Amino acid sequence: MSETNPAATAPVSADAAPHRYTAAMAAEIEARWQDFWDAEGTYAAPNPKGDLAGDPELVARPKKFIMDMFPYPSGAGLHVGHPLGYIATDVFARFQRMTGHNVLHTLGFDAFGLPAEQYAVQTGTHPRVSTEANMENMRSQLRRLGLGHDKRRSFATIDPEYYKWTQWIFLQIFDSWYDDEAKKARPIAELVAQFEAGERAVPGGRTWSALTEAERADVLGEYRLAYASDAPVNWCPGLGTVLANEEVTADGRSERGNFPVFKSKLRQWNMRITAYADRLLDDLDQLDWPEAIKLQQRNWIGRSEGARVDFPIDGERITVFTTRPDTLFGATYMVLAPEHPLVEKFTPDAWPEGTRDAWTGGHATPAEAVAAYRAQAASKSDVERQAEAKDKTGVFIGAYATNPVNGERVPVFIADYVLMGYGTGAIMAVPAGDQRDFEFARAFELPIRCIVEPTDGRGTDTSTWEDAFASYDAKIMNSANDAVSLDGLPVVEAKERITEWLERTGAGEGTVNFRLRDWLFSRQRYWGEPFPIVYDEDGVAHPLPASMLPLELPEVEDYSPRTFDPDDADTRPETPLSRNADWVNVTLDLGDGPKKYRRETNTMPNWAGSCWYELRYLDPHNSERLVDPEIEQYWMGPREGLPHGGVDLYVGGAEHAVLHLLYARFWSKVLFDLGHVSSAEPFHKLFNQGMIQAYVYRDSRGIAVPAAEVEERDGAYYHQGEKVSRLLGKMGKSLKNAVTPDEICAEYGADTLRLYEMAMGPLDVSRPWDTRAVVGQFRLLQRLWRNVVDENTGELSVVDVAEADIDADTLRALHKAVDGVRQDLEGMRFNTAIAKVTELNNHLTKAGGPVPRSVAERLVLLVAPLAPHVAEELWRKLGHETSVVHEDFPVADPAYVVDETVTCVVQIKGKVKARLEVAPSISDDDLEKAALADEKVVAALGGAGIRKVIVRAPKLVNIVPA
Ligand code: ANZ
């Protein structure tokens, strides 16, 4: 790097004074203080009790729990983009320590996951071996940054002592149900007691004692918060695994490998997160999170108010969910999802009289048409099925239902634009009001009845319409029967009236529907937490007792999922764990004598370990409990400003807006309901850092060339003489533009890297990395050093001066910096804090002469959170015996902080009428207001109106009366 970047090396050159702050000196200072901090346990945060109990004076302080989203230990190690958030939380944590808080700050590893498993498949290295090596590498990279972590509290999610508790929480969730009346989770034993006592009717109408064990297990499976069910999942034979919806592309293929993905029914573990939909939504209001993230969670949960309506058919009924019951009179056909379980039941042997050709798909019987269409639909992803632009397809199932509001016979179709997993999997189709229904009706020659008065001038003759008409401001028409009329009502009132009618007549009821689905919780992979579940000979699932945890991941010969012919939808996954017969088939005594069992061979998804890790940081070595209640209450409990409790600050990327944060909130709520924790939310304040971007340079073939080898000449970029293009993109190995923290540390030191990353801009904004600019922060540290230490002798250069004898300009500069930096650090405006430190430092440089000791000390304290190593070194040089980490942050004397004022002249028609003393930074708006409110100005205007005001803040206001 230095070859192409001579500017960067200049200040470190050999002719420097012997005690100048250089990269070599930074390296020496930094290594020494890092060793010191480790040896002294400087960042140890004491708990109120237990093995991490400590200094009661510290414990008595208000607590701050400051957390990063922990990293996945990737083989590529860190580039300079990764530590942005870690440095920010570290600066903030250091500031909080210096302002009277007991600060918990540490970092672990999220270490189960696919990359290690894939690497294992490719190279035969055990995932644990490669993961441990990656963690070792990342730990040393992170240590080099001087992050003030309490290392006693760090762990990885793959540690058996950690995942023991992940498994334990799974069992808690398995052993609970959601009581809709109490609106909370309760132990499943309490539900069983209700069934036994006859207080709650057993589904199916029999008594509890009459059920077999397997039947009871089935009943309870409908209540448990973790349950196994035959769910349609994304099965990818080419990869040999089931995929999450997010891992499937819009055209129904695997994101990784581009193989076909099929909807297949497989027995899978699920988490009943839907039971918490309301609370997950409502509690968002109390959290201090970016609005954008809250909105994404709200949309993901997707609450819709509407109605369920029953359409009678053959003495039975099909229930639909609609958000627009007011449009019931316009429902001219129905659509079921192709997978809807009632489809077979209502599909007759032959096409009824008068079936149109367009409806049959060319098939001889309804059953054939249904079977063919189902096969076609199964090969598509939900996204693809719902795509707006797509041609609407479907078939008539040969049956008619009755529209309950007008008794009309409406044909029933299956079509893939209706999804099984949403609402009831069946809709009433209102082609006049819904665009998808409109397109379908046009394609299948179905009636389109105008039931909302168009307000856009298109008229009520739907044969001339080009699209559906949707508006909440329009009025309902053509919608009356003998008992109820919606005609003339606006939508909202019409909804209320028809819902009342539906409920009165028993044809339906108002309801709330959520987009949120239960969380598919099993994976056919090796590198994850084993389920603490065994099956008996009847296939009934039994939880392992806590005493058998952790259930450790067994060794297997082959980690790879078995893959199949990518196009063979009928194949089924084979889990790596199932190949280990000795582990799978066990004899256990679960309390009723030794019996044979078969272990669950799926593993948990890699989200599991990150669902609760904040809790384990609190009490990481507790072998008796997940976390001691008193310790949990101390760090996480609710208090003023923290209504649900939680981590005080959680920093990470916005890409985790939904899944991780929603899953973690869900687990918190279950643990809270069951009384294991006092906080019902994991993270009170969330902050998303921006991304560090990097320039990508490409040659004429579009191939990325190594960014470090590119030269700039007159605004153009060259690589080996050839002109290359430059675009801002992601940083990474593949784009050949990764810069590692190691290289920057070697070139300048960690303190410079920290300052540079924090100075680049507001933390939440993305910014381009520019290696050439790093030197600016290095120079700041050199000037800081020079203000305290004589570069030639290495001795302190400060002088002892009484506060009263320090010149007023310096005191003003000092106190303004103290005041500003304090506010900026509290508000996480690290870039402006650095600007203020720089300003003060420059003032001292310019003032010339030795710096007063008390000023130098305060300057060092201001720098300490940002550049902790050099601050420790200077603090020690200034004669202090103890670490700067626990010193008090300076407080400004308000007398010096008030802005000096300037005089503003107020003129009317060019004549001076008043003078105002205002702050030099006053805005035009504020100055205009102040001028117009001034007594003398009011008097001079004498009630005349104003034509124009010309403002030149801070010195002049000119008023032109009307
Ligand atoms: C009649 C109607 C008339 C509808 C109208 C909309 C407009 P949100 O708001 O997202 O909750 N729907 C219901 N279940 C569905 C499923 N399983 N697959 C596809 N579509 C489904 O959407 C609810 C609306 O989406 C429902 O209201 C239903 O169409 C459709 F002028 O019913 B509506």
Image (cartoon, grey):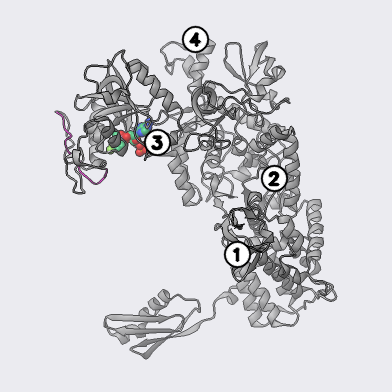
Q: Position of residue 952 (x, y in %)?
A: 43, 81
Q: Secondary structure at mark 2?
A: loop
The alpha-carbon separation of the residues under discs 4 and 2 comes to 49 Å
Residue on which the image places disc 4: 209
* Residue on which disc 3 sits: 386
Pick the front one: 342 or 316: 342
Which of pointers 3 and 2 indicates the residue nearer the eye? 3
Q: CA distance from mark 1 to mark 4?
A: 69 Å
C-alpha separation, residue under disc 3 versus residue under disc 2: 52 Å
User: Along the polypeptide, which appears first: circle 3 or circle 2?
Assistant: 2
Q: Which residues are magenta?
A: 470-481
Which amino acid, by three-letter code, is at mark 4? Ser
For residue 831, the mark is 1
Q: Any atom of ligand 1 within 8 Å of the CB at mark 3? A: yes
| Amino acid marked by disc 2 | Asn
Q: Amino acid at mark 1?
A: Asn
For the residues labelled 1 and 2, the Cα–Cα distance comes to 33 Å
Residue 856, placed above or below residue 43? below
